Amino acid sequence: MVQIWYVSYGSNLSPARLDCYLAGGCPAGGGRTYTGARNPHPPAGRAGLRLPGTVYFAGESLVWGGGRAFYDPDLPGDTAACAYLVTAEQFDDIHAQEPPCYDRVLDLGVHDGVPMRTFTATVGCGDVVRTAPSAAYLDTMANGLREVFGWNYERAQAYLRRLQP
């Protein structure tokens, strides 16, 4: 069984949110129920990471309302991310449940000898109109930042404010 680190920088920073992609269900504050992955087991591991580049919000989320998070590795700055150790099949199933605008898979190197991957848009921040995310989306991201990094409420909010248009 091939394992990879799925690296999340948006709502899937929250382990409870990611669980909806694996086991199925509707995330708190979300407007869609997910079927889940063929293998519904939780990740075998989790690690907080910092990535070069920045998250931006664009488009309109059908799940949350407001802008969706995308990662642009070419922008200055850094990104707080959560890596989940999943099977390659689970990564594919998570990706398949995302909207088609997440059409670029990025290889992010290796962590503990295992490849890291994420997905984002093919177009970068400079090629889209940025849109503000919904409060529910930001709350889910903040919950993930607090759980993964141990950040307090103020630190998580300061990070998220930096990302918004």
Image: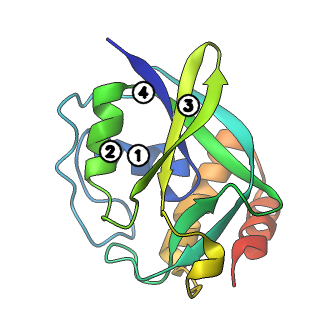
Q: What secondary structure is marked by label 3?
A: strand
Q: Position of residue 106 (x, y in %)?
A: 53, 44
Q: Residues within 10 Å of mark 3 (few under 14, many from 20)?
A: many
| Residues at marks 3 and 2, CA–CA distance in whole angstroms | 14 Å
Q: Residue at x 30, y 38 (%)?
A: 92
| Residues at marks 1 and 3, CA–CA distance in whole angstroms | 16 Å
Q: Which residue is mark 1?
A: 18
Q: Position of residue 86 (x, y in %)?
A: 41, 26
Q: Residue at x 82, y 60 (%)?
A: 155
Q: Is residue 10 above or below residue 146?
A: below
Q: Which residue is mark 3?
A: 116
Q: Which residue is mark 4?
A: 43
Q: Which of the numbered marks, if any, corresponds to residue 101?
A: none
Q: Position of residue 57 (x, y in %)?
A: 58, 75
**Residue 163, image quadrant:** bottom right
Q: Is residue 101 above or below residue 133?
A: above
Q: Which residue is mark 2?
A: 94
Q: What secondary structure is marked by label 2?
A: helix
Q: Residues within 10 Å of mark 4 (few under 14, many from 20)?
A: some
Choose the circle earlier in sequence order: 4 or 3: 4
Choose the circle earlier in sequence order: 1 or 3: 1
Instruction: Indicate which label's residue lies in the foreground, 2 or 1.
Output: 2
Q: What secondary structure is marked by label 1?
A: helix
| Residues at marks 4 and 3, CA–CA distance in whole angstroms | 14 Å
Left or right, 136 with respect to 75, comes to left
Q: Residues within 10 Å of mark 2 (few under 14, many from 20)?
A: many
**Residue 34, image quadrant:** bottom left
Question: Pointer 2 and pointer 1: residues touching (CB < 8 Å)?
Answer: yes
Which residue is nearer to you in this view: 22 or 73?
Answer: 73
**Residue 27, image quadrant:** bottom left
Could you tell me the amino acid type at mark 3?
Answer: Met
Choose the circle earlier in sequence order: 2 or 1: 1
